[in-house]
Image (cartoon, rainbow, N blue to C red):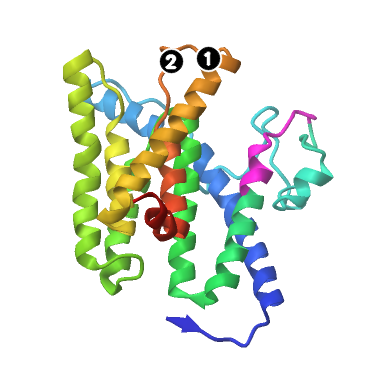
Amino acid sequence: MVIDLGFSPMLLALIGLLLGAIIGSFLNVVVIRLPLMLEAQWTRDSREFLALNPENQPTLSLSKPASHCPHCQNPIKPIHNIPILSYLFLRGRCHHCGASISVQYPIVELLSAVLTALYVMEYGISTTALASMLFTYALMVLTLIDQRHQLLPDQITLPLLWLGLLVNLSGLFASPADGIIGAALGYLSLWSVFWLFKLITGREGMGYGDFKLSAALGAWLGWQMLPMVILLASLLGLVVGCYGIIFAGRDREAPLAFGPYLCIAGWIAMLWGDSISLYLF
Protein backbone atom coordinates (compact mmCIF):
# COMPACT_ATOMS: atom_id res chain seq x y z
CA MET A 1 0.00 0.00 0.00
CA VAL A 2 1.34 3.42 -1.01
CA ILE A 3 0.15 6.73 0.45
CA ASP A 4 0.55 9.64 -1.95
CA LEU A 5 0.88 12.91 -0.05
CA GLY A 6 2.09 14.83 -3.07
CA PHE A 7 5.57 15.39 -1.62
CA SER A 8 8.44 16.08 -3.98
CA PRO A 9 11.36 13.59 -4.02
CA MET A 10 13.58 16.21 -2.37
CA LEU A 11 11.11 16.70 0.48
CA LEU A 12 10.72 12.95 0.91
CA ALA A 13 14.51 12.61 1.12
CA LEU A 14 14.70 15.36 3.74
CA ILE A 15 11.94 13.77 5.81
CA GLY A 16 13.71 10.43 5.55
CA LEU A 17 17.03 11.93 6.66
CA LEU A 18 15.54 13.68 9.69
CA LEU A 19 13.41 10.71 10.73
CA GLY A 20 16.25 8.26 10.19
CA ALA A 21 18.73 10.33 12.24
CA ILE A 22 16.28 10.47 15.17
CA ILE A 23 15.63 6.74 14.94
CA GLY A 24 19.38 6.11 14.72
CA SER A 25 19.81 7.95 18.02
CA PHE A 26 17.26 5.61 19.60
CA LEU A 27 18.99 2.57 18.07
CA ASN A 28 22.19 3.62 19.84
CA VAL A 29 20.28 3.63 23.13
CA VAL A 30 19.01 0.10 22.46
CA VAL A 31 22.50 -1.15 21.58
CA ILE A 32 24.00 0.26 24.78
CA ARG A 33 21.21 -0.37 27.28
CA LEU A 34 19.51 -3.61 26.24
CA PRO A 35 22.51 -5.84 27.15
CA LEU A 36 22.79 -4.05 30.51
CA MET A 37 19.07 -4.52 31.13
CA LEU A 38 19.35 -8.24 30.31
CA GLU A 39 22.37 -8.63 32.58
CA ALA A 40 20.50 -6.96 35.44
CA GLN A 41 17.48 -9.20 34.84
CA TRP A 42 19.64 -12.35 34.79
CA THR A 43 21.26 -11.26 38.06
CA ARG A 44 17.86 -10.74 39.70
CA ASP A 45 16.59 -14.11 38.42
CA SER A 46 19.73 -15.90 39.62
CA ARG A 47 19.53 -14.38 43.09
CA GLU A 48 15.84 -15.25 43.29
CA PHE A 49 16.53 -18.84 42.21
CA LEU A 50 19.29 -19.15 44.83
CA ALA A 51 17.05 -17.58 47.48
CA LEU A 52 19.47 -14.69 47.98
CA ASN A 53 18.45 -11.22 49.06
CA PRO A 54 17.74 -8.99 46.04
CA GLU A 55 20.29 -6.33 45.26
CA ASN A 56 19.29 -2.68 45.37
CA GLN A 57 19.98 -1.70 41.79
CA PRO A 58 18.90 1.52 40.12
CA THR A 59 16.07 1.21 37.62
CA LEU A 60 17.40 0.76 34.09
CA SER A 61 15.25 0.89 30.98
CA LEU A 62 15.42 2.34 27.50
CA SER A 63 14.05 5.62 28.88
CA LYS A 64 15.47 5.77 32.42
CA PRO A 65 17.79 7.16 33.55
CA ALA A 66 18.01 10.11 31.16
CA SER A 67 20.96 10.32 28.77
CA HIS A 68 24.18 11.02 30.62
CA CYS A 69 27.93 10.83 30.13
CA PRO A 70 29.20 7.37 31.18
CA HIS A 71 32.43 8.96 32.45
CA CYS A 72 31.32 11.96 34.56
CA GLN A 73 27.63 10.93 34.92
CA ASN A 74 26.46 14.46 34.09
CA PRO A 75 23.13 14.60 32.23
CA ILE A 76 23.34 15.44 28.54
CA LYS A 77 21.46 18.59 27.62
CA PRO A 78 19.04 18.40 24.66
CA ILE A 79 21.23 20.83 22.70
CA HIS A 80 24.11 18.36 23.09
CA ASN A 81 22.00 15.39 22.05
CA ILE A 82 21.07 16.37 18.50
CA PRO A 83 21.84 13.44 16.18
CA ILE A 84 25.09 13.82 14.21
CA LEU A 85 25.26 17.61 14.61
CA SER A 86 26.01 17.58 18.35
CA TYR A 87 28.87 15.14 17.85
CA LEU A 88 30.41 17.42 15.24
CA PHE A 89 29.82 20.56 17.32
CA LEU A 90 31.37 18.97 20.42
CA ARG A 91 34.19 17.49 18.31
CA GLY A 92 33.45 14.05 19.67
CA ARG A 93 33.93 14.95 23.35
CA CYS A 94 31.69 15.36 26.40
CA HIS A 95 30.76 18.98 27.07
CA HIS A 96 31.35 18.55 30.83
CA CYS A 97 34.45 16.39 31.24
CA GLY A 98 35.96 16.27 27.76
CA ALA A 99 35.90 12.47 27.61
CA SER A 100 35.84 10.98 24.13
CA ILE A 101 32.43 10.03 22.72
CA SER A 102 32.28 6.78 20.77
CA VAL A 103 32.20 7.29 17.01
CA GLN A 104 29.51 4.60 16.93
CA TYR A 105 26.88 7.22 17.77
CA PRO A 106 27.20 9.44 14.70
CA ILE A 107 27.91 6.48 12.40
CA VAL A 108 24.69 4.70 13.38
CA GLU A 109 22.70 7.93 13.17
CA LEU A 110 24.11 8.77 9.74
CA LEU A 111 23.63 5.24 8.40
CA SER A 112 20.06 5.15 9.67
CA ALA A 113 19.36 8.57 8.15
CA VAL A 114 20.77 7.70 4.73
CA LEU A 115 19.07 4.29 4.49
CA THR A 116 15.72 5.69 5.65
CA ALA A 117 15.93 8.44 3.02
CA LEU A 118 16.79 5.90 0.32
CA TYR A 119 13.85 3.64 1.25
CA VAL A 120 11.41 6.56 1.25
CA MET A 121 12.71 7.81 -2.10
CA GLU A 122 12.60 4.32 -3.61
CA TYR A 123 9.25 3.08 -2.24
CA GLY A 124 7.51 6.30 -1.21
CA ILE A 125 5.41 6.38 1.94
CA SER A 126 4.35 2.75 1.75
CA THR A 127 4.14 -0.58 3.52
CA THR A 128 7.27 -1.71 1.69
CA ALA A 129 9.26 1.28 2.91
CA LEU A 130 8.10 0.79 6.51
CA ALA A 131 8.84 -2.94 6.48
CA SER A 132 12.27 -2.37 4.91
CA MET A 133 13.08 0.20 7.60
CA LEU A 134 12.04 -2.07 10.48
CA PHE A 135 14.01 -4.97 9.03
CA THR A 136 17.10 -2.79 8.60
CA TYR A 137 16.89 -1.18 12.05
CA ALA A 138 16.62 -4.59 13.71
CA LEU A 139 19.62 -5.92 11.78
CA MET A 140 21.68 -2.84 12.69
CA VAL A 141 20.97 -3.31 16.40
CA LEU A 142 21.65 -7.05 16.30
CA THR A 143 24.91 -6.50 14.43
CA LEU A 144 26.26 -4.06 17.01
CA ILE A 145 25.09 -5.99 20.07
CA ASP A 146 26.50 -9.27 18.80
CA GLN A 147 29.77 -7.63 17.82
CA ARG A 148 30.14 -6.06 21.27
CA HIS A 149 28.72 -8.81 23.49
CA GLN A 150 28.39 -11.94 21.31
CA LEU A 151 24.70 -11.87 22.12
CA LEU A 152 21.60 -11.93 19.92
CA PRO A 153 18.73 -11.03 22.27
CA ASP A 154 15.48 -12.94 21.98
CA GLN A 155 13.77 -9.59 22.58
CA ILE A 156 14.75 -8.66 19.01
CA THR A 157 15.21 -11.93 17.07
CA LEU A 158 11.86 -13.46 18.02
CA PRO A 159 9.71 -10.37 17.26
CA LEU A 160 11.67 -10.03 14.01
CA LEU A 161 10.77 -13.63 13.15
CA TRP A 162 7.05 -13.18 13.82
CA LEU A 163 6.98 -9.80 12.11
CA GLY A 164 8.51 -11.36 9.00
CA LEU A 165 5.75 -13.97 8.88
CA LEU A 166 3.08 -11.29 9.33
CA VAL A 167 4.60 -9.00 6.70
CA ASN A 168 4.60 -11.85 4.19
CA LEU A 169 0.93 -12.67 4.70
CA SER A 170 0.46 -10.27 1.79
CA GLY A 171 3.53 -11.61 -0.05
CA LEU A 172 5.53 -8.42 0.43
CA PHE A 173 8.97 -10.07 0.25
CA ALA A 174 8.01 -13.74 -0.13
CA SER A 175 4.86 -15.82 -0.26
CA PRO A 176 3.35 -16.90 3.08
CA ALA A 177 4.33 -20.53 2.43
CA ASP A 178 7.91 -19.57 1.48
CA GLY A 179 8.19 -17.46 4.63
CA ILE A 180 6.97 -20.28 6.90
CA ILE A 181 9.26 -22.83 5.25
CA GLY A 182 12.10 -20.29 5.36
CA ALA A 183 11.66 -19.80 9.11
CA ALA A 184 11.78 -23.56 9.72
CA LEU A 185 14.71 -24.23 7.39
CA GLY A 186 16.58 -21.17 8.62
CA TYR A 187 16.52 -22.51 12.16
CA LEU A 188 17.16 -26.14 11.28
CA SER A 189 20.05 -25.44 8.90
CA LEU A 190 22.27 -23.73 11.49
CA TRP A 191 20.96 -26.00 14.26
CA SER A 192 22.21 -28.99 12.23
CA VAL A 193 25.59 -27.35 11.63
CA PHE A 194 25.86 -26.60 15.36
CA TRP A 195 25.31 -30.21 16.40
CA LEU A 196 27.47 -31.67 13.64
CA PHE A 197 30.35 -29.38 14.65
CA LYS A 198 29.84 -30.26 18.32
CA LEU A 199 29.83 -33.99 17.63
CA ILE A 200 33.05 -33.73 15.64
CA THR A 201 35.01 -31.28 17.80
CA GLY A 202 33.28 -31.42 21.17
CA ARG A 203 32.89 -27.63 21.09
CA GLU A 204 30.03 -25.29 20.33
CA GLY A 205 30.67 -23.41 17.10
CA MET A 206 27.84 -20.87 17.39
CA GLY A 207 25.10 -19.72 19.73
CA TYR A 208 21.39 -20.44 19.72
CA GLY A 209 20.73 -16.81 18.82
CA ASP A 210 22.21 -17.51 15.37
CA PHE A 211 19.53 -20.17 14.78
CA LYS A 212 16.76 -17.71 15.65
CA LEU A 213 18.27 -14.96 13.52
CA SER A 214 18.55 -17.33 10.56
CA ALA A 215 14.91 -18.33 11.09
CA ALA A 216 13.92 -14.65 11.10
CA LEU A 217 15.80 -14.05 7.83
CA GLY A 218 14.04 -17.05 6.30
CA ALA A 219 10.67 -15.72 7.47
CA TRP A 220 11.33 -12.35 5.81
CA LEU A 221 13.08 -13.42 2.63
CA GLY A 222 11.73 -16.92 1.97
CA TRP A 223 13.55 -20.23 1.98
CA GLN A 224 14.97 -19.65 -1.52
CA MET A 225 17.28 -16.91 -0.19
CA LEU A 226 18.74 -18.94 2.66
CA PRO A 227 21.55 -20.69 0.72
CA MET A 228 22.78 -17.33 -0.57
CA VAL A 229 22.49 -15.68 2.85
CA ILE A 230 24.44 -18.42 4.63
CA LEU A 231 27.04 -18.54 1.85
CA LEU A 232 27.56 -14.76 1.91
CA ALA A 233 27.66 -14.69 5.71
CA SER A 234 30.23 -17.51 5.78
CA LEU A 235 32.42 -15.78 3.18
CA LEU A 236 32.26 -12.46 5.04
CA GLY A 237 33.11 -14.15 8.32
CA LEU A 238 35.99 -16.02 6.71
CA VAL A 239 37.47 -12.88 5.13
CA VAL A 240 37.15 -10.80 8.30
CA GLY A 241 38.47 -13.62 10.49
CA CYS A 242 41.50 -14.23 8.29
CA TYR A 243 42.23 -10.53 8.09
CA GLY A 244 42.08 -10.25 11.87
CA ILE A 245 44.45 -13.18 12.37
CA ILE A 246 46.95 -12.16 9.70
CA PHE A 247 47.02 -8.39 10.01
CA ALA A 248 45.49 -7.50 13.39
CA GLY A 249 47.05 -10.20 15.57
CA ARG A 250 43.72 -11.72 16.51
CA ASP A 251 43.85 -14.94 18.55
CA ARG A 252 42.88 -17.94 16.41
CA GLU A 253 41.00 -19.46 19.35
CA ALA A 254 39.01 -16.31 20.11
CA PRO A 255 35.31 -16.77 19.24
CA LEU A 256 34.01 -14.83 16.25
CA ALA A 257 30.45 -13.54 16.33
CA PHE A 258 28.55 -14.88 13.31
CA GLY A 259 25.45 -12.75 13.80
CA PRO A 260 26.83 -9.57 12.19
CA TYR A 261 27.64 -11.42 8.99
CA LEU A 262 24.19 -13.03 8.90
CA CYS A 263 22.69 -9.55 9.33
CA ILE A 264 24.78 -8.04 6.54
CA ALA A 265 24.05 -10.96 4.22
CA GLY A 266 20.32 -10.76 5.03
CA TRP A 267 20.24 -7.04 4.29
CA ILE A 268 22.05 -7.59 0.97
CA ALA A 269 19.61 -10.37 0.10
CA MET A 270 16.61 -8.13 0.80
CA LEU A 271 17.84 -5.47 -1.64
CA TRP A 272 19.66 -7.46 -4.33
CA GLY A 273 18.89 -11.10 -3.57
CA ASP A 274 17.03 -11.85 -6.79
CA SER A 275 19.79 -10.42 -8.97
CA ILE A 276 22.56 -12.19 -7.03
CA SER A 277 20.66 -15.49 -7.09
CA LEU A 278 20.31 -15.33 -10.87
CA TYR A 279 24.05 -14.72 -11.14
CA LEU A 280 25.20 -17.33 -8.60
CA PHE A 281 22.62 -20.05 -9.01
Range shown magenta = 97-108
| Residue 179 visible in the shown view | yes
Residue in view at x 59 percent, y 58 percent? 115
Q: Which quadrant: the N terminus?
A: bottom left
Disc 1: CA contacts within 10 A as few (<14), some (14-19) or many (>=20) = few
- In the image, 46 versus 53, the foreground residue is 46
Q: Which amino acid does label 1 sit on?
A: Arg
Is 99 in the magenta?
Answer: yes
Disc 2: CA contacts within 10 A as few (<14), some (14-19) or many (>=20) = few
Compared with 136, 2 (above or below) is below
Where disc 2 sits, the SS reads loop
Identify the mark at residue 254; answer none if there is no mark. Answer: 2
Identify the mark at residue 162; answer none if there is no mark. Answer: none
Q: Where is residue 126 in the image (x, y as percent from the top left)?
A: 48, 76
Where disc 1 sits, the SS reads loop
CB within 8 Å, label 2 to label 1 = yes
- In the image, 170 versus 276, the foreground residue is 276
Residue in view at x 33 percent, y 44 percent? 213
Compared with 15, 241 (above or below) is above
Q: Left of 262 or right of it: where is 88?
A: right
Residue in view at x 50 percent, y 46 percent? 140
Compared with 142, 247 (above or below) is above
Is 24 in the magenta?
Answer: no
Identify the mark at residue 250; answer none if there is no mark. Answer: 1
Residue in view at x 56 percent, y 51 percent? 26
Question: Disc 2 and disc 1: Cα gap in Å?
Answer: 7 Å
